[in-house]
Image (cartoon, helix red, strand yellow):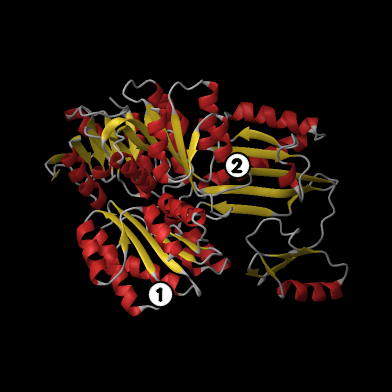
Amino acid sequence: MGIMIDSSTRVLVQGITGTQGSFHTRLMLDYGTKVVAGTSPQKAGLEVEGIPVYGSVRDALAERSVDASIVFVPAAFARDAALEAISNNIGLLVVVTEMIPVHHAFQIKEAAERAGVKMVGPNTPGVITPGKSKVGIMPSHVFKPGEVGVVSRSGTLMYEIANTLSSAGVGQSTCIGVGGDRIVGLKVADVLKLFRDDPGTKAITIIGEIGGGMEEEAAQYITETKYPKPVVAFIAGRTAPPERRMGHAGAIITGEVGTYKNKRDALEAAGLEVAKKPSEVAETLRKVI
Amino acid sequence: MLKAQLPIKERLKHGGIMKAEDEEEVGTLSRVLFSKSIEGLPVTEVLLEKAIPFTKEFYLAYTFDWRKQRPIFMFSAAGGAGLEERAGTGEVLVLDADRPRPSFVKSFVAETKSKGSTEGEARRLLRVAKRMKKLFDDYHAETVEINPLAADEREEFTALDVRVIIDNDALSTQKALREKLAATLQRPELEKPTVRENFVQLEGDVGVIGNGAGLVLSTMDLVKLSGGEPADFLDLGGGASRENMVQALQRLSKIRSLHCIVINVLGGITRCDEIAQGIAESVKTLQLPPIYVRLVGTNEGQGKQILGEAGISYFDNMEDLVASAIKG
């Protein structure tokens, strides 16, 4: 099982003719993802890796059925691409593009919520259901099929922890990077909600980092809903000083909220184990499963 | 009034705003201001304007609530210095900026009238707010704030201090604004579409480099847990080349008295052989402290071979990496 995607998910690649778009289309196909179409405004009629390219989402949908779209379109045009997917009712939208202006990110998020579209990102590595499908840019080899759901605010740290889990024999049901920006579609708590109803997910790992309030929100959600599955967390950035932007726009500490301590305290108060090192996540998970 | 023209908040608190009683004092106080640096920025321009007597100070702002991930409007009938500290006390009205216009107007007018404004004043405040919203949207601002908007006895408004923060990621599409900002803020780098800042220098003596913000942050955390102090945060980003690696080490070679450098790379789109070549090349040409490398992922075998030939120790696991570096 797993959430959001499986081997039958049909994927549209928006911006398929770009360097990133075509490169990752190849890797997604290699992994077994059912990529069925791509878009590129000026290059309709071409093929990329054997996949037909259309001038617009509407044109693609006239010939192909699509369940999910992944956006590689450059930041200046990403909003229009994302809105086009949303207005055509594609149920899952994964926005890989980084450096999208926050006003645009907000407009995409609002439109997605109104239309009932699940939006992942922007600035996300995407979603992978190991062994079945990936709609994203993550290195596949670190993921192994299994029963632990992973939701992460960071890309490489998700790879790192998935790698330690896989080597310790702890496979994953689905791994999702929610995106490193300040405004993102699905938040950590939203993903917990999806994992809750998935019979294939027995436990969950939250990979957080300083800044924002998503971990605190997740802790509140776990407490309020008496979350039925064990959750283990890891938070990066205990040594980072406040008010400094450390890579991710989302990772700025302002005031009390968003500090390492605030997040750890909130998660522990919700009954979670917070691992001190990436390698401890696997050990802790083995204890709770 | 003399006001240092600097892009910082709370200028009054930092001594950037002064009041002169006569012409002579204008001279002495401007000399004081021009000799100052505030928050690391030297004062190069001072605005001289008539002191305006006012009876009320309002606070108006459009900004984002990053927790709720929404644009908001904030208003207080008691603006002025120190408002930030009173933000949570109920003195500040917070409205959803995207709320439908009639409901927005209703809440706003009710609030201002309850704080002693006339209907006319409330309407005029609303006009100011409307124009601020246009600025906020048109220029992709993260914040547009007037504090205070002063009103005199005749209910004339003057914006005594204004702060606008533009979203860096929206600058690439705003050429005219970019050029203007680069010129007035004397920051020529703003003219080029920005790349995300990926280096922050810290106090410690263990250099840290990695690919991906989360991975670098957790490497810094491990350094600290093992008894060391990180000297920096340096994120190579995705798909870093040999040149990027060389530039990163050049950057760290300028920090004196580093005890060691730890490099943590988990290659996805980043290729380990590129990273290894960059390291091997830098070790020959730069003055560097001992380097410890963790290198796994794409083209890992080639990468390790290059490091081995250059006599650089490498690890498969980030915890072994940091432990060895600190013991080193």
Quadrant where the N terminus of chain A is found in the figure: top left
Q: Is residue A42 visible?
A: no
Quarter of image, res A60: top left
Residue at 31% across, 40% down: A168
Indicate the position of residue A253 as horizontal and vertical percent values: 57, 48
From the viewer's side, name the closer residue of B321 and B137: B321
Task: Farthest residue to the left: give it.
Answer: A50
> On what subunit does the disc labeled 2 rest?
A
Crowd rating for badge 1 (residues with CA inside 10 Å; few <14, some 14–19, many 20+):
many
Up the image or down, B163 lies above or below B79; here it is below
The three-letter amino acid code for the residue at tag 2 is Val
User: In this figure, which residue is indicated by the disc labeled 2?
Assistant: A257
Indicate the position of residue B222 as horizontal and vertical percent values: 46, 53
From the viewer's side, name the closer residue of B156 and A93: A93
From the viewer's side, name the closer residue of A137 and B83: A137
The three-letter amino acid code for the residue at tag 1 is Leu
User: In this figure, which residue is indicated by the disc labeled 1?
Assistant: B288
> On what subunit does the disc labeled 1 rest?
B
Element type where label 1 sits in the image: loop
Residue at 37% across, 64% down: B292
Q: In the figure, is residue A239 to the left or right of A161?
A: right
Indicate the position of residue A12 as horizontal and vertical percent values: 24, 36
Element type where label 2 sits in the image: loop
Between the residue at mark 2 and the residue at mark 1, the CA separation in whole angstroms equals 38 Å
Crowd rating for badge 2 (residues with CA inside 10 Å; few <14, some 14–19, many 20+):
some
Quadrant where the C terminus of chain A is found in the figure: top left
Quarter of image, res B260: bottom left
